[in-house]
Amino acid sequence: MKIAFTGAGGFIGSHVIRSFKDYASEIYILKREDSLENWKEIITNSDVIINLAGSPIMQRWTKANRKNILDSRILTTRKIVQILNNLPEDIPSKLFISASATGIYPNDKFKTYNEYNTIKGSGFLAEVVSKWEAEVDELVNPAVRLVIARLGVVLSKEGGMLKSILPLYKIGLGAYISNGKQITSFIHIDDVTSVFKFFIENKNTSGLFNLVAPTTITNHDLIRV
């Protein structure tokens, strides 16, 4: 099993790649600075492409950072899709797992949203995810099985939200956001890796999937725990 990754230097990507070292026969890293020809060669030779590229969401949303957050996702995904679409349809089947986010849904504490809901939220994050997934929707090569993985907040002591807030809580400066009633859909980093392996091994999986714990939790309860 040959697997290519984007976003290898990120919090999620670095963890997933470490977890796949004994799972994949070969691991390739698609680097933003590499040539298009290099990307074509790697993608052509891979059985699975896992797209985890994207500048971190948890940063100040200045004009420059907003552009980087959007472009880092859009341009990388567009490049992969174009390469996949230009491959012959008689190639051995491939799997393309493209990360997305549950931020596409409205922030509504009274409703539950699943993969079949078409209602989208408002604001910058929902805009990013909508445009991100629009690039993936351009994939038309029938030889490629597509999975869009809408990730919730990924929890791990190694990075992401927990790594940034735990030092504050350890010295007694932690607090929940506003009234603490915001709904948080979360998933542990090890479960992300397990679900990706599930997609690879179960060839009937395709389309949209929410990668989150079975139940939601409020920001107040999450912070308390």
Image (spheres, rainbow, N blue to C red):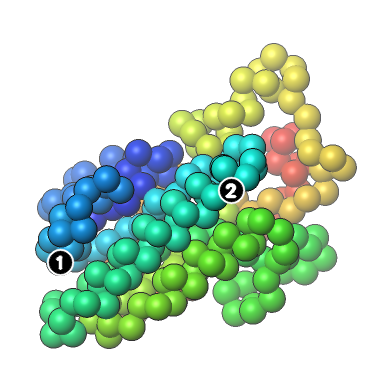
| Residue 194 located left or right of residue 30 | right
Kindly identify the residue that appears in the image at 64 percent across and 37 percent down.
60
User: Residue 157 location in percent, x, y?
Assistant: 51, 31
Tell me, for residue 105, which label it has, or none.
Answer: none
Alpha-carbon distance for marks 2 and 1? 32 Å
Kindly identify the residue that appears in the image at 28 percent across and 82 percent down.
141
Q: How many marks?
A: 2
Amino acid at the residue labelled 2: Arg
User: Residue 115 location in percent, x, y?
Assistant: 57, 74
Question: Disc 1 on helix, strand or loop?
Answer: helix
Residue 3 showing in the rendered view: no
- Which residue was labeled with disc 1? 44
Q: Residues within 10 Å of mark 1 (few under 14, many from 20)?
A: some
Tell me, for residue 66, which label it has, or none.
Answer: 2
Q: Which residue sits furthest front?
A: 64
Q: Are marks 2 and 1 in contact (CB under 8 Å)?
A: no
Residue 217 showing in the rendered view: yes
| Residue 126 located left or right of residue 87 | right
| Residue 176 located left or right of residue 192 | right
Judge by depth and name the residue closer to the eye, 223 or 10.
Answer: 10
For the C terminus, the image quarter is top right
Question: Disc 2 on helix, strand or loop?
Answer: helix
